[in-house]
Amino acid sequence: MATYKKRGYRKPKEKVEEVLNDDLTNDVDGYVEGESTTEEVFNTLDESANKAEEWVAANQKYIFGVVGVIALSVLLYMAYGKFIQEPNEAEASNDAYKAEFYFAQAVNATGTAKDSLFNLALNGGEGKLGLLDVIENYSGTKAGNLANYTAGMAYLNMNDYQNAVTYLDNFSSDDEILAANAKGGVADAFVQLNQLEDALTHYEKALATTTNDYSTPKFLYKAAVVALDLGENEVAAKYLTRIKEEFPTSLEVGKVDALLGKAQAK
């Protein structure tokens, strides 16, 4: 049976108030506990910060000293490059110009004029420095480094193979073609000195430096010839086969079959 509720009737609120009071008490307790934990965290952070500040204060001379040394080193490096290295590079290039010019003329010359021009390139002429002077006076410059390559090639053309090895070995370059040619030049010199194992090693270094249609088939062929002389027929066959398969339009490919047959027959 439905119960009629008189107008204006209200339920008792004692129990509701108890519940609210209990919840409020719990919230306050929790807040106090949370506040205590947070306070501990901040206290720990403050202690750490204080210790860090104390360490910095105690070691500030050392810290400033290290920072100063680093800053000074950077400034000195920049100054060296700007006021010493750059002028040296420019001066070295200028002094090497005439020697490089003599070398270029010698490459295209014939007969006795060829050796005379190579000598001028190496030792200088007309009051200008030669390649050997540039190497001595401008060690550490790009021009001095390049002079090692040019001098080595000059000695190779003059049949002075020991000096060719010495100067070409002193040359280094990020240019793959020049680096490969230098190693190949050393190998050519070792062939003439009858140091065939050293020659094969340097031909292989030249081959490992770069791959291109000009120098690679040339060094593959030379390496194969030396390998045959050393009795390393499988190595020779491998290099000759590479010429046929990878460089079919090269100048060396026409000479491959005869050598390949010799390598396979052995």
Image: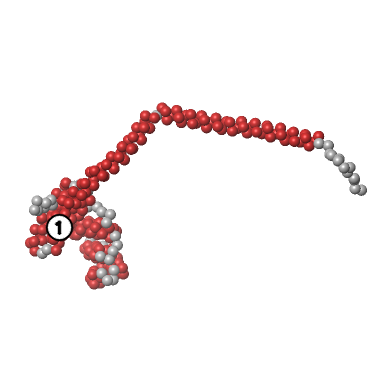
Badge 1 marks a residue whose secondary structure is helix
Asked whether the viewer can see residue 76, the reply is yes
Q: Is residue 216 left or right of residue 123?
A: right
- Residue behind mark 1: 101
Picture coordinates of residue 137, whole percent (x, y): 16, 46
Asked whether the viewer can see residue 193, the reply is no
Determine the residue positioned at 14% across, 63% down: 108
The disc labelled 1 sits on which kind of residue? Phe
Count of all numbered marks drawn on residues in the image: 1
Residue that sits furthest to the right in the current view: 1
Considering only vertical position in the picture, is 265 above or below 75?
A: below
Q: Nearer the viewer, residue 102 or 204?
A: 102
Q: Quadrant of the C terminus?
A: bottom left
Picture coordinates of residue 110, whole percent (x, y): 10, 64
Determine the residue positioned at 58% across, 31% down: 39
Picture coordinates of residue 95, whole percent (x, y): 16, 51
Residue that sits furthest to the left in the current view: 112
Residue 174 sits in which quadrant?
bottom left
Residue 257 sits in which quadrant?
bottom left
Considering only vertical position in the picture, is 86 above or below 254?
A: above
Residue 17 sits in which quadrant?
top right
Picture coordinates of residue 198, whole percent (x, y): 22, 56
Considering only vertical position in the picture, is 168 above or below 251?
A: above
Considering only vertical position in the picture, is 133 above or below 31?
A: below
**Circle 1 residues within 10 Å: few <14, some 14–19, many ≥20:** few
Q: Is residue 63 left or right of residue 265?
A: right
Q: Nearer the viewer, residue 212 or 44?
A: 44
Determine the residue positioned at 13% across, 61% down: 105
